[in-house]
Amino acid sequence: MTEHPAPAGHPLRADPEPMTIPVPAPLGSGAVEEAVAIWRTLVALGVRHVAISPGSRSAPLVYALEDPEIAGRLEAHVRIDERAAAFTALGISRRDPGSPGVVVTTSGTATAHLHAAVLEAHHSRTPLIVLTADRPIELRGVGANQATHQVGIYGDAVRFATDLPAPSRDGASEVELRTAVSTLARAFAAATGPRPGPVHVNLCLRDPLVPGAGTVDGLASTGSESGPESASVPGPEHGDRLVVTRRIPPREPTPVALPPDPRAVVVAGDGAGPAARAFAETHRLPLLAEPSSGSRGGPSMVTGYPQLLAQVMADPDHPLRPSQAIVYGHPTLSRPVVGALLGAADVETIIVDPTSSWADASRTASLVVPALALGDADDRADAAARLEDWRREGALLVEASEPTWQQRAALAVWGATGEEDTLVLGSSSLVRDLEQLAPAARGTVLAGRGLAGIDGMASTAGGYALANEHAPDEHAAAEHAPAGRVRLLVGDVTALHDFTGLIVGPLERRPALDVIVVDDSGGRIFSGLEHRRAHPGLLERFFTTPHGADIAAAARALGVDAVRYEGPQALDALVRGLERPTDGLRMIVVGP
């Protein structure tokens, strides 16, 4: 057999026999039978988690969870808020993109609540499978309850979108089942393909939405061998199997040999990965790595680079002024990087991106390459001296700074993140504080930098933690050894914006997650932007937006173990709190 490469976490490792699933037994409902086929398909392709919000039109997908073919292979997470469900699924995908999260909603306004997560998945290139239930064609445009135009609702933000016709009322035909299976296989391939992102399958479902009489409690006992006598329309022959189409992942792009300019710098934006660090170290180039780049560390990393770069680019004759910027990932955080460096007329920009949707906000890129060959190590003395100048000047700026209490809190959380841990950063001043001040990253650092919004951060981190707990741990010999701790660091406005993400019902598995909230009663980030010149009343009311909420008390009201530290000893208490072992969901609020 010919070997084919597959990304990590993808179920396809070689070229085995064709993958098939059993045809669902007759259940007296074409909608439920199709739902069974959908789950069997997704599980066969590697899906392990689904986030579901309650609803009636989507009920067939709930009943189908009782199917014995998927028992123990697909875990459902119920969330009341559809937006929280969508970001939970997004967080699941962030843990293992080869096993993307699925979100299921009923029809109507529920579908609109998914849009923010779909946009974030689109811009961050994160797989996400969206299944929205819908009325059949005969109930569209006639004023039927909870019926709106759901087809194409997410526009060009999805990699694949389709409107799956409703199966026959009392039993799905073979053609209808094969159409559903083939459609979901295409959706999975698009979500996890060369340009990963969200996909949308709109499921038209016709009554009855429940299994036939005698099957509501007995679906788990029905399989591919026998069905209930109540099924009035014969389905496909029992024992038949449906082929599940798999797409062989494309090979990695061929690296391009491109020796860098001696005065180049390497910019590692969000999601750049280890390639940026490796290239910088090989050629002894300054590495300007965002906290969530996956590149922040090593002998080329420059701390304090946002402030240093602002000084360098303000002076055309500065001895450290670069002539070339090699960009990996999605740079978004620093205006000195995105504007001053990448927008400079005398700096050549080269972007490393294997897709056709590269990041070039300043529209100055002269070249885009799919990957760069490392080439020979640069052992020139002038290269080493220039790198040392960058690192020394950046370190001096960090040493000369007087961190605020908010910055010290962020650095305490950063320092508590070990090699096996994961730190999720919200889109606030804190991530920028860490960009300027933080040393090398030890664990995995993630951020919602696709659109840099504050939506769904608690839910995203919760979804990541749920998938992380049962994922193989790369740092342990045992396959199911406990994974490292997952922590979310956010400001108070971001925390309040996704408070429903903390609602995890008593029947649901709770994520092992620390939520650390730096509460300075408002959006501090606007004081660092041009809006700081607004008169104080305008700045405070419309930008800072003080809330006056007791965040810890509100979290406790939702069933979260929450504590607040404030005063002169707050940071010491934070450090001790982070060291205290725990295995559940907790919140630590830090105030002045």
Image: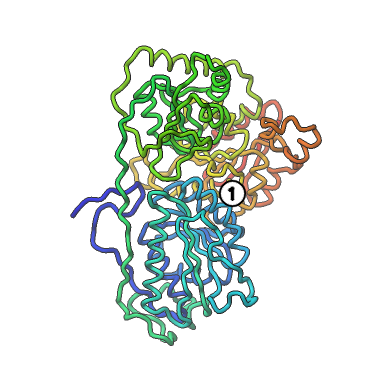
**Percent x, y for residue 295?**
43, 32
Question: What colour scheme was applied to this rendering of the protein?
Answer: rainbow
Residue depicted at 49% across the width and 13% down the height: 319
Q: Is residue 554 above or below residue 270?
A: below
Kind of residue at badge 1: Gly
Asked if residue 438 is positioned above or below residue 98 in the image, the reply reads above
Of residue 339 and residue 130, the one placed in the foreground of this image is 339
Left or right for 445, reference 307: left
User: Is residue 3 at all visible to an observer of this figure?
Assistant: yes
Q: In this figure, what is the number of numbered marks?
A: 1
Picture residue at 37% right of the left edge, 67% below the top: 182
Res. 383 image quadrant: top left
Q: Quadrant of the N terminus?
A: bottom left
Task: Pinpoint residue 347: horizontal percent, then vertical percent.
Answer: 47, 25
Task: Check the image and report above or below for 490 versus 460.
Answer: above
- Counting from the top left corner in percent of width and height, residue 179 is at 39, 71
* Residue 348 percent location from the top left of the image: 45, 28
Q: Residues within 10 Å of mark 1 (few under 14, many from 20)?
A: many
Residue appearing at x 67%, y 30% in the figure: 528
Q: Residue at x 54, y 19 (%)?
A: 312
On the question of residue 421 being in view, the answer is no
The residue that mark 1 highlights is 456
Quadrant (top left/top right/bottom left/bottom right) for the C terminus: top right
Residue at the right extreme, as displayed: 537
Label 1 element class? loop
